Amino acid sequence: MQQEVIIVGGGMVGLSLALMLAKKKIAVKLLEAIKYPNYDDEHLAPYHSSFDARNSALSRRSVQIYQELGLWDALQQYATPILEVNITEQGSFGKARLIAAQEKVESFGQVIENAWLGRVLLSEVKKQPLIELIDGVKVTSLKQDADFAYIEAESNQQKYQLQSKLLIAADGRDSFCRKALGIGASEHDYDQVAIVTSVQTSKPHQQVGFERFSPLGPLALLPLPGEYRRSVVWPVPKGTEHEWLGEENDQHFLDALQETYGDRAGKFQKTGRRFSFPLSQVLAEKQAIGRVVLMGNAAHTIHPVAGQGFNLCMRDAYVLVRYLSEQLEQAADLGDAAMLKDYEKSRLTDQQRVIKFCDSVVRGFSNQNPILKLIRNTGLMAFENIPGIKPLVANYAMGLKA
Ligand SMILES: Cc1cc2nc3c(=O)[nH]c(=O)nc-3n(C[C@H](O)[C@H](O)[C@H](O)COP(=O)(O)OP(=O)(O)OC[C@H]3O[C@@H](n4cnc5c(N)ncnc54)[C@H](O)[C@@H]3O)c2cc1C
C-alpha cells in the first residue's frame, strides 16, 4: 500500500516540501489553516501569511532546488540576481564587499517576491496528482502511537480525522503541533519589529544588495525586478513601529532611509505600504519525535538579518526528502523514528552555524559602544583584506557549504 505523508502547514516550507516529496513519488496530504486566495480572480488580494509583502533572498542552493523541481523558469520572471553585496556601518569607515564575479559565480542568489513565489508554488501543487491540498482547515489535535500519527482538523463546514505513518509539522513559529507533542522551545525576543516594504530610488540598483548597520537597526536593501526598485527590511526597536507604518508617515520613512543610507542609491523617491513583523528566535528542543518531524519555522525561527531562515529550511527539506526516498526504495516505514532522528542529527551542524551567525550579527551590531564600533570596523576591514575569508563566507551565504 502506498504510504501517504501528512504535512500540517502550507506556507513556503510546507508547499515546497510537498513538491519535493511528490517529485520522489511520495503522496502527500497537505493541510493549511488559511483559505488560499483564488489567484484566478484578480480582484482578490494575494495575501497569505507566508506570501505577504515580503521579498526573500534565495541562496544559490535554494535556486538549485527549485531548478531541480522544474520551477525556476516560472519563478525567475519576478526574481533578480544579486551580483554584489556591500556591508557597512553608519558612521564608520569599514566596508566589506562581496562580488559574485570575483567568487567565480554568476550571482550569490536571487531576490524573489513572496507573493509570486506563493502563486507559483500553489499552482504547481494544484497540478500535482500526488498532492491532496486541503486549505481552510485547522489542525486541532495531534497524537501518535507506535503505528501512526493521528490528527483532528476542522474547517467551517467539516471535521476531519486522519492518520499517517509520517506527519511533518510545518506550521510556523507558534507551531500547534510542536506544543501538542509537548516539545519545548527556547525563545528569545529581539525587541525589534522588521519594517518591510519596497521603495523606488533615483539610481539603478545594478543588482547590488546592501546591509547597513545603523543605530536604529540593520537595514537591508536588496535589488528587485525593475532597475530602480529595492526591497527594504529594517528591524527597528519594538514600540516604534507606529512611526514608520501608515501612509501619513511615507515621507518620514523615506527621509530616515535617506539619512541612514546616504546618497549611494540616489534619492529615495517612493515607498510602498509598510508592514511589520515581530522578530524573535524560537528553537525547538527536538525536531523529531516518534513519527513526527518539525520543519521550517516550527523547528527554528531566526532573525532575518542575513536572509538565511528560509534557505536553511530548504536545505533541511531537501535532506529529509533524501532520507524518505531511500526509505521508499526499500519499502520501509516513512515514519521510522530512528531514521527521523538520524535526519535531525545530520542537520544540526548546518542549523547551529546559521542560527549562531544570525544571532551574533544582531547582538554584535546592536551595541553603539564606541570601542565595540571600532572592533566592528576592524572586523569589516579584516574581512575585506584577509585572503581566503571571502570565498568561505560567500559559500556559506550561498548555502553551498553546509
Ligand atoms: C521580515 C522577514 C524577512 C525574511 N527574509 C528572508 C530572506 O530574505 N531569506 C530567507 O531565507 N528567509 C527570510 N525570512 C525567513 C522566512 O520568511 C521563513 O523562514 C519562512 O517564512 C518560514 O516558512 P514556514 O512555512 O516554515 O512558516 P510560515 O510561513 O509561518 O507558515 C506556516 C503555515 O502553517 C499554517 N498553520 C499554522 N497553524 C496551523 C494549524 N493548526 N493547522 C493548519 N495549518 C496551520 C499557517 O497558516 C501558515 O500558512 C524572513 C523572515 C522575516 C520575518
Image (cartoon, grey):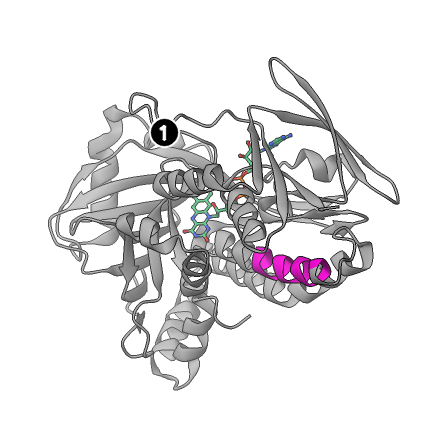
Locate residue 226, reporting x and y percent.
18, 48
Which residue is depicted at the point 59% across and 58% down? Answer: 316
Viewer-proximal residue, 69 or 286? Answer: 69
Q: Quadrant of residue 141?
A: top right
Does the magenta-highlighted stretch encompass residue 324? yes
- Mark 1 residue's CB less than 8 Å from ligand 1: no
Q: Is residue 212 visible?
A: no
- Residue 53 position (above or below residue 340): above
Quarter of the image that includes the C terminus: bottom right
Q: Residues within 10 Å of mark 1 (few under 14, many from 20)?
A: few
Q: Is residue 294 visible?
A: yes
Task: Tell me the element at label 1.
Answer: loop
Which residue is depicted at the point 43% across and 55% down? Answer: 307
Which residue is depicted at the point 69% across and 43% down? Answer: 4
Viewer-proximal residue, 363 or 80? Answer: 80
Q: Is residue 118 left or right of residue 96?
A: right
Question: Which residue, as the protein is rendered here, is positioned at the far right?
Answer: 146
Q: Is residue 315 left or right of residue 82?
A: right
- Span of residues in magenta: 316-328
Instruction: Give the tally of numbered discs.
Output: 1
Which residue is depicted at the point 33% across and 29% down? Answer: 245
Question: Which residue, as the protein is rendered here, is positioned at the far front?
Answer: 1
Q: Quadrant of residue 256?
A: top left
Locate residue 80, reporting x and y percent.
27, 55
- Give the dominant element type of the magenta stretch: helix, strand or loop: helix
Locate residue 324, reporting x and y percent.
68, 57
User: For mark 1, what is the residue?
Assistant: 39
